[in-house]
Amino acid sequence: VAFVAGLDQDEGAGYVRGALEDLHRRLDGWPPVPPPSRASVLGALDNVEELLEGDVVSRRIYPLNQEEKVLALVETMRAEGGADGVRGVEGYRIRFYADVHGPMKLHWGVAGAGEHQHSEWLLPPEACRPAHTVCDEEACNTELGGGGPLQMAVVDVTRANPLAGISFVLQRCQTSEWVKAPDGGNFYLPLPAEWVADAVGQKEAAAARLQRAAEQAREEGLEGEAPEGEEGQGGEVSLPTSILDSLATFDAEEENDLLMYRKTYEVEGLGKILTSVRSEKGSQNGEYLIDLTAETQEDVPLSLHWGLAAVPSEMSEKLNCREMVDVSGEWVVPENAEDLPPGTACNLEACETEFMLGSRTAVKRLRLRVSPQDGMTGLAFVLRSGDQYFVPEDRKDFFVPIPSGALASLASQASQNPCVKSTHVYPLGREGTAGKLLALVEDSTGFNEGEQQVEIFSDSPHGLVLHWGISCPEESWRCPPEDMLPPASRVVNSSCETPFERAPAMLGVSTGEADEEGPEERAFLQRVKIEVPRGCEAQSVTFVVRTAGEDSREQLWFKDRWNNFVLPLNASKEK
């Protein structure tokens, strides 16, 4: 105002001084003093850094409103006698202190340390999750402990799982109200970028050294060499000499895994090869284990020349599912090099991996880990020994179906079956990272007239439980009637919980019939079968899915994004 009025320097200074004094008089007594009943307790933590074992490299205060705040301290964790600087930091301990009115939960995810992951909200690794943490496919929820006005949680991040930072919001336990950043988004706590880069580089370098050591051992013939000892006592290695002995050894190691497929090939001029597919019980990685055990007629070097078998994405047009990954060709090379066994070499068309289990035995073994992917049906391969390739007599390559491929094949069969009224495919987790569900509504076959059968198959490597109810004209979720409950079901409040059981990837086959014939040369999936009685007024089956296990802190819950899955019972196949 003084400038626009054209006042000189002295006149302008006097005008500004008088205006400020007038403003102070008008604002006398504002803002009001906070009531004495609510005093911030974060001030008591001003000197908390002096009590911690490590150095505090970051101290951030996140205001929730005028009265409530969250303090985040990032403390270094160093190994005793470790190196100086960033290299000596083993990890960081993140301490969240919440000065809030009532009990709160920390709803959080992590920003990965990869090149393109810094802006993503990812599910925290298991090793980072503190006690009293429950996770679904999207995020983790950690109860803030301590009670009273000051609550806290501690998250440890180490070099084994380097992270760029933590994204979080809070939720009030009593009202379920979400408390977010002032802009309506997430709060974010970054970790020191220099340490993140060093930890990622160290992890990649260690993996490269391990791969080089394995390659050098094979080149020098050290794999399986016997240790030297006294005459008549050393020089022999106790290894299985037949494929049956080998299977007994390996099955003893994996008796807790779920066998999904097994087949033995007779390979002319080479010997036998046994293939099997398993899912690890209790594993949170969501992978299939493909084992190949070879018994050769002579002790010869053996390599697997392989690729992931793919199906055209046109299948998605026949089904009620989200678009599948567009893949071309029959063999696809894995994109993620971390999923490859040590010593694997790949080009644009295929990969090659040498069998390993000692050079003095004709029984060798190879293990691959494969994650469920859209369009991937299994493992396609041929065998190579020296310059000679071995293929099946009636096909161009050997094939091992993985459950996701068996599910896609079953979905295709169901879409052509006149007894199947509707076919739906639902992803589990973001973009189906934990597998898929195939839900079929079938007309009665062998039932009383008017009854229906619902079959829900899954290719998930996790053991699953169906948490479900039915929707009726007057209710969107109702506990199903007793005559509709499958065996092994239990009623929990107003819902039914039914565990998935192992079943062949076929329509209308009971698990008992499948067990009588055994698993040889047949792919298996998980399945829940529901019989809808005649006269039932249910319009749809409404459900969510969780992983098996009684400890709620270890369960993962899967939904249709943020809603329940809904399977209409009267939809036609064309819908």
Image (cartoon, rainbow, N blue to C red):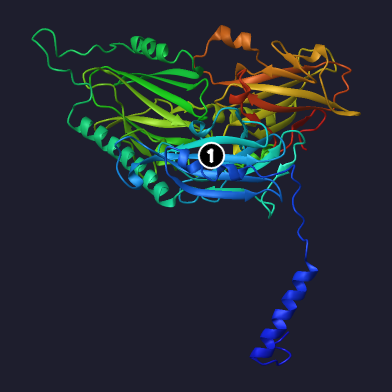
Q: Position of residue 27 (x, y in %)?
A: 78, 66
Q: Position of residue 570 (x, y in %)?
A: 83, 29
- The secondary element bearing badge 1 is classed as strand
Whole-percent x and y of residue 360?
A: 21, 18
Horizontal side of residue 90 vs 370, given as left or right: left
Name the residue nearer the viewer: 416 or 223.
223
Q: Quadrant of residue 422?
A: top right
In the rendered structure, the answer to whether residue 287 lies left or right of residue 184 reads left
Q: Is residue 198 above or below residue 171?
A: below
Task: Residue 14: name its quadrant.
Answer: bottom right
Using the image as rendered, state which of residue 21 and residue 54 is in the foreground: 21
Picture residue at 46% right of the left edge, 36% below the top: 308
Look at the picture and state if 447 lies above or below 104: above
Image check: 163 left or right of 366? right
Residue located at (46% from left, 51% from top): 115
Disc 1 residue type (three-letter) = Arg
The 10 Å Cα crowd at callout 1, few under 14, some 14 to 19, many 20 or more, is some
Residue at the location (22% across, 20% down)? 299
State how many labels appear.
Answer: 1
Please say whether residue 400 is visible from this viewpoint. Answer: yes
Closest to the observer: 272 or 289? 289
> Which quadrant, please, contains the C terminus?
top right
For the view shown, which residue lies furthest in the right direction? 474
232 shown above or below 194? above
Instruction: Tell me what residue is drawn at x 56 percent, y 30 percent.
Output: 404
Q: Residue furthest left?
A: 231
Which residue is labeled 1 in the image? Answer: 95
Where is residue 4? Give x, y as percent.
Answer: 72, 89
Position of the N terminus by quadrant: bottom right
Pick the residue in front: 250 or 17: 17
